[in-house]
Each structure stands twice: as C-alpha cells, then as structure tokens.
Image: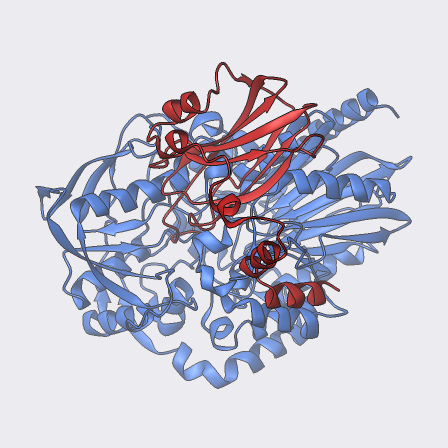
Chain colours: A red, B blue
Amino acid sequence: MNHQRRTFLKSTSAAGAIAAAVAAGLLKPTQVLAADWNKSAFTADKAAAALTNYGISSPSRSKDVLLNAPDIAENGAVVPVTITSNIPNTEMAFLVVADNPNPMAASFTFANGAEGFISTRVKMAKTSYVKAYIKANGKYYFAEKQVKVTIGGCGG
Amino acid sequence: MNRREFLQMLAVAAASGLALDSENLLAAGNPSDLYRLPKFGNVSLLHFTDCHAQLMPIYFREPSMNIGVGKSWGQPPHLVGEPLLKHFGIQPHTRDAYAFTYLDFAEAAKTYGKVGGFSHLTTLVKQVRAQRPGSLLLDGGDTWQGSATALWTKGQDMVDATKLLGVDVMTGHWEFTYGAERVMHLVNNDLKGHIEFLAQNIKTNDFGDPVFPPYSLKEVNGVSVAVIGQAFPYTPIANPRYMVPDWTFGIQDGHLQSVVNEVRGKGAQVVVVLSHNGMDVDVKMASRVTGIDAIMGGHTHDGVPAPTIVNNAGGKTLVTNAGSNGKFLAVLDFDVKNGKVADYHYRLLPVFSNLLEPDPAMAGLIKKVRAPYEDKLNEKLAVTEGLLYRRGNFNGTFDQVILDALMTVKDAEAAFSPGFRWGTSLLPGNEITMERVMDQTAITYPATTVNHYTGKQIKAIMEDVCDNLFNADPYYQQGGDMVRVGGIGYTCDPTQSTGKRISQMTINGKLVAPDKKYKVAGWAPVSPNQTGEPIWEVVASYLRDKKVIEPTKPNVPTLVNVKGNPGIGATA
C-alpha cells in the first residue's frame, strides 16, 4: 500500500498538484505566490524586526505550542519542522529561524476552525533556534528549539 | 505493588547489585570464579555491542582520557584509571583493572593476555545461557564493520558469525555504511528467521514510514518481554548521507515513548531498549522517557561495570554500556514478580581469551572466513617499539602513526584523522600486519584527501567536531572523539560553548593566520565520488618504508579548565 501511495505521488509531483489546482480554478497564480505576503517581515534581517513587522508582540511561552524539529539537522537545506497548536481559535502560525539571513521563514493563516497543524521544511545555514509563534484570540504564544547544523563526519 | 514499592525494590536491588559486583570483582583474581555466574531471576538478557567485527582475540586498551562536561563531569562513563577503579570498587593490579582501565596496560596485557574473539565469546555465551533457559542475546550493532574480512565480505562474515552465536535481536550504525540496499538484502534474507533487526528511530524521508520493526515482543519463561531497537541517531551526519539517502534517523524520544506505551499496553512486563545512542544520550533519554526498565547501550564504547540508575517521572531506568571490540559480555538478570521487575543483577564480564576454550564450530567458521585472505592479512609491514592504541578524547598513538603517514606520503603540513573509537591495540615489540592496519581503517569510504584550507576553515572544522564531543547537552553530541590533528598545536577548553573551545592554534610553530591557506591531508570524506588512494594503502606504504615505529608521543592540545576531571588519567 505504501508502495502504491509512493508511486502515485511520484507520478504527480507536488508542483504538478498545485498546477492542477490552479487549472481547476481553485487557486489563482497570485494567491500561490503572494497571498498576504508581508514583505517587511520576510525581508527583515533580524528576528526581532521580523516579529515587530508582523505585529507579534509580548509572546508567551506555551506548552500548548508543540514544535518538532531534529536536534541535529541531517541536511541543513531541508530541515523538517512541524508545529502543532492546541490553543483554541488558532488564527496564524509563524516560523522563525533566528540566525538565518532572513529569520522569518513562513507564516500560515488558518481558516476558521482549521486544525492548528503545520508540517514543512526550512533551510538553515547554521546552528540556530527555530521558533514557532501562534496567534490565537489576538494573543501570541511561542515554542522554540535549538537545531544544530554541523559539517558531519568524524563520528563513531 | 504500587509505584513507591517498586522504587524501593529497585533501590534495594541497586544496592545489592553493586555489592554483588564488588564481591565478584574482588574474587576475580581467581580465574575459576570469574565466569561462575549463579542463575538469578526469571528473565535474562545477554548483551554485547560494538564488537567491530573482531572475530579473533585482540588487545584493547581503554582510554586514559574520557572527559565529561556539564552534568557528566565525574559521572560514569566519564571516569578513567584510578577514579574508575575506586568508583566501582575494583582492586588495582588485578585482572579486572586490566579489563576496565588503561593502567599498566602493556605489562598487564602480557600477564592476562588477549581479550574477545568470537569462538571464545561463543563458549562464554553458551555457558551463561545454559544456566538461563529462555535468555535473549542482544547485539547492539557496529558488528559488521571494523575488520578487513568484514569489509571484504561486505559484512557477510559477521552476519554468519552472529547467526551461529545465536543473536536474537540487533540494531545498527556502521552496518548502514554498506548502503541501504546491502543492509536490506541481509536483513530480508540472511537474518530472516534468525535475527530481528530493530530500529524505532529510522523512517523513510517521504512519508515517515518505519523502515525496520520498532520492537520485538518475546515470551521468556512465561514473562512478556519487549525489546525496542534504537539505531545510531546521527548516522546520516557522522557517516556518508549517500549511503542511506531515503532514510531519516534522529533520537525520536517522543516516538520511543509511544512505542513503550504500546508494548506496555500489549502486556509487556519487562521493557528494554537496545540502544546505539551512546551513554550520555541514553542517560538523558532515560530521564525523559518513562516505562523502560533498562537501556542497554553502546556506541561510545564505554566498559561500565555497573548500571547507572536514572530517575524519571515514571520510576527508574537502568542504563548500561558494554564496551567494544568483543571484549565484554553483559548479563542482566531480572526477577519479575507479579507482572513487574522486582529485582535485578548486572554483570559486565570481560572475555579473557585464555580462560575460555574456543568453541569448535565458531572456530571452524572463522578459519573458513579468513582462509582466502590469510596472506594479505598477515603481511608484516613494520614492528612497533611502543604501545599503539586509538581510544582517547584527543589522540592515540596509532592515530599519530596514521597522521604521520598522511603528512609524509601526501607531503602536507597538517593532517586530520577521524576520532573513531574502534581499532585494536598493539604491544611494544608486536608486528604491525596489514590486518592491524585494517583494524583502524576498514571503512567503505576510505579515500584520502588533500585540501588547501584557510586557517579560519581549519578552526571551524575543529570547533565543529569539538562541539560534537563536548556540547553540554548530550542530544547535540555525536559520540565520536575529537578529530586527531597532525602538525597543528592548539589549546582546548572543553567547558566553553560552541565555537569558543579552540585557541592558540599553531602550524609549523607559528600562530595560524585566518586567511592563509595550509595544505591539509585527511581521509574518510563523507561527500560522494572521492577518488583518493585508500587510507590503508597510504599507511601500509609508510610502514613498509619505516620498518620500525619508534614510541610516538601523540599530538594533543593543551587543556584548560578541566584540571582534576576524573576523566583524565593521572599517569596518561
């Protein structure tokens, strides 16, 4: 079954799936590229500025925000990250890689009642804290984890 | 029995376990007592790990430097020499002091002889299992790599040997350096119906599907026992990524908790994790994951005589580490009553080759395996006048020989050699054969390299590896030792944070300039398509040329801020 699922998805790559959605009129190209894109937040070169530009203020650390990322990245170019928000009325999620040249990596808007779950991959140049911010009921919450990026080799 | 009673029982068990160990260790001066191991309890687990394909008896010197920082300062396994003997109640100048420490190694080795060897290990396993019907034999991995014959047969010799030995369950690390395809072929054919290969922390990159079964549930004398596999979490980082391109690893302790809950839910009364994390990682993992009775560990090659008992929210977990190179067999006996572990005994038995008759069937297999290669293995390259060994945080004498060979043959002003922890030891006067060179170098990515690095790049590499060793959080460590450097002097402060441990670097007696380029030789690159001459050829040609290796002093850094650390040998 897994094998079939894998074969199926290989033949319809992610890009292909999006193209299909566009063709079906589900998404307009402008939405794919730039829906609600906050330029000043995404181009800021400091995490603090990126947060300010998004209006994220006084976030509190929350156990209801779960951030899953590797302790040491297997490949800094594609570091898998998942965010789960168990906070009711989660509206938005933000993913920040504190020491990246542009720390704001992604933002997500949840439609009313959508499950607060995100799975994505980020590029990391070096060891850094990865932070997940959640906006819910007008307030901000966060979780963080250090992800180490190493040159590899010399082990064992 | 409620949780509090269980904790009390474990505390009592710990005390009695330790006392029993000390008594046996004291008595161990008398060889006939050494392997007299009275049956205890109703569930027994035998464990060896990191044998690194050493089928024949060998010498193996334990480290004179194994520094612990942060919470690990002075805690097992970060004890060497006298502090280790004192901590575990082992008398100096005994057979066990020889097995567990580097002290007087060359002299003691002449008295007590070689250790390990699969035909000797087989005899011991049979002897211990005869008194323990239904016992399980666990192999912690790093079994298929580390010798010439393992490399040349792509692990086949070790697969055949472990099947004959009667291994029930294994996990892995260096196994994966034969490539995913070879591993799956052996697992799905040779091991099938004999040895279960387990790993709860290996999944496919794309969908996160498990690659191997996470656990095995066994019925042992009417008791349900779960063994969970934990492969080396950083295989794609410490070893070439291209060997396992479609798999993702990691510690995955959240997933481990769900696996523990699942097996407990299925009625497991004993839950054991067969781990290749390394001991510091296992100790941290034991503090975070509940419901595990014991983590039987390897990877860091620590011969730890007694378990470390770790408290967590659900109770207590034993953490053991069973050394390397076939030198030890661990025996963990559980007394399971009313569905729970009530008491335990643990022994880490050194395998003294001259106290155990070789098992004829295993001896026959080994002879057959070696026959086609005997001439190559036995080629005499040189004689060593000094003791040659590898283990130690910063360097070993055999690594120094490798560095000298690299710098000489490649005409480089500096050299890097990986901080591997496997590799056998040679006594003064021993011949260095090709087999002994392969013991230090037999890997599937043996290419030598020559790079022109800037001083800044050299420092960055050294800082990176140093952090893998001394990061205060074990989850950010990789379990190897510091990269060995030839031609480079430096000062190291293991207690500093990432990027700040290395200073005062010199090459050719001059301070290293950040922007100047230096010619640096090395080996074991993790990137693909490297075509340099294999390291064993470089070392062999150097040895043939030299004929006699004088006692060498390994190049080690000046250490600061670790004075009095019990992981630094006083006479090292």
Give the percent coordinates (x, y) of residue B170.
Answer: 66, 58
Specify whether B129 is left or right of B70. Answer: right
Extreme residue toward the bottom, this view: B372
Quarter of the picture containing the N terminus of chain B is top right
Q: Do we see residue A63 in this rendering?
A: yes
Q: Do we see residue B36 in this rendering?
A: no
Quarter of the picture containing the C terminus of chain B is top left
Give the percent coordinates (x, y) of residue B325.
Answer: 51, 57
Q: How many marks?
A: 0
Asked if B383 appears above or below B236 in the picture, the reply is: below
**Res B12 → quadrant:** top right
Asked if B149 appears above or below B36 in the picture, the reply is: below
Give the percent coordinates (x, y) of residue A124.
Answer: 40, 42
Specify whether B507 is left or right of B105. Answer: left
Which residue is at the front of the view, B49 or B254?
A: B254
Q: Which residue corresponds to the image point at 37% horizontal and 62% vertical from the top-left?
A: B527
Give the percent coordinates (x, y) of residue B85.
Answer: 50, 35
Which residue is at the front of the view, B448 or B436?
A: B448
